[in-house]
Image: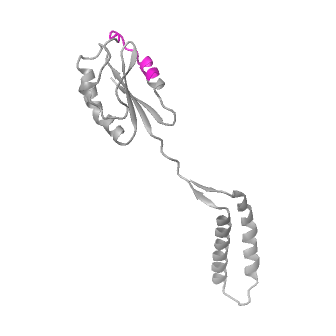
């Protein structure tokens, strides 16, 4: 984004252009119409660039925020028994890609209740060693509680997002 430290100096631009136009009328040498117009254009552009330079232009780029992704894993009985293991295997490439780019991840298992899974947020995922909670009531599925649990893990200064695995 381009910004000016002293934007108020742009108010001088009309006065500078008028001065260039007035001074160009006084010429010691006669010239053709095309040449006068070209000369006036070049001088006006030079005056405009000078006024712009006096305003001190600054180019800024916003720094990208790191990402924090909360993955929600449905472990309820409404899915086949091997569904969590298959979902974790399918999740591994996405998780590892996020970690490789320097972002953070979390896993929340949910059924009738939601519970964060204690795995490192900055290491590659090892699906076979993920300690899924056994105490969740699997006879129900409460997605709203899972989203609420994920939102409680959000981090300040991160681009937070939620991915639902069901």
Viewed as shown, does residue 59 lie left or right of 141? right
Viewed as shown, does residue 91 lie left or right of 15? left
Image quarter of the C terminus: top left
Closer to us: 17 or 68: 68
Q: Residue at x 32, y 16 (%)?
A: 133
- Quarter of the view holding residue 164: top left
Closer to us: 164 or 122: 122
- Quarter of the view holding residue 104: top left
Q: What is the total number of numbered labels drawn onto the structure image?
A: 0
Q: Residue at x 75, y 79 (%)?
A: 23
Residue 137 place in picture, x, y as percent: 35, 10
Q: Which residues are magenta?
A: 136-149
Examine the rendered structure and indicate whether residue 77 appears above or below residue 164.
Answer: above
Viewed as shown, does residue 132 lie left or right of 24? left
Q: Residue at x 53, y 48 (%)?
A: 62
Residue 60 place in picture, x, y as percent: 55, 53
Residue 17 place in picture, x, y as percent: 72, 70
Residue 146 forms part of the magenta stretch: yes
- Quarter of the view holding residue 129: top left
Say how the picture is coloured.
Answer: one colour
Q: Residue at x 44, y 18 (%)?
A: 144
Residue 157 forms part of the magenta stretch: no
Residue farthest to the bottom? 29
Residue 1 place in picture, x, y as percent: 56, 53
Closer to us: 155 or 3: 155
Examine the rendered structure and indicate whether residue 116 appears above or below residue 52.
Answer: above
């Amino acid at each position: 984004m381009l910004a000016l430290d002293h934007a108020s100096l742009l108010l001088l631009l009309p006065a500078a252009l008028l001065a260039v136009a007035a001074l160009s009328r006084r010429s010691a040498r006669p010239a053709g119409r095309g040449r006068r117009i070209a000369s006036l254009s070049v001088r006006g552009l030079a005056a405009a660039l000078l006024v712009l330079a006096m305003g001190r232009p600054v180019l800024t780029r916003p720094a990208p925020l790191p990402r924090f992704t909360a993955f929600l894993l449905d472990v309820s009985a409404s899915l086949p028994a091997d569904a969590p293991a298959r979902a974790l295997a399918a999740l591994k490439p996405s998780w590892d890609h996020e970690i490789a780019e320097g972002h953070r991840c979390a896993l929340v298992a949910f059924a009738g209740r939601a519970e964060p899974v204690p795995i490192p947020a900055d290491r590659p995922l090892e699906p076979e060693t993920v300690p899924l909670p056994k105490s969740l009531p699997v006879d129900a599925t409460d997605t709203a509680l899972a989203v609420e649990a994920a939102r409680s893990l959000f981090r300040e200064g991160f681009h937070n997002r939620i991915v639902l695995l069901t």
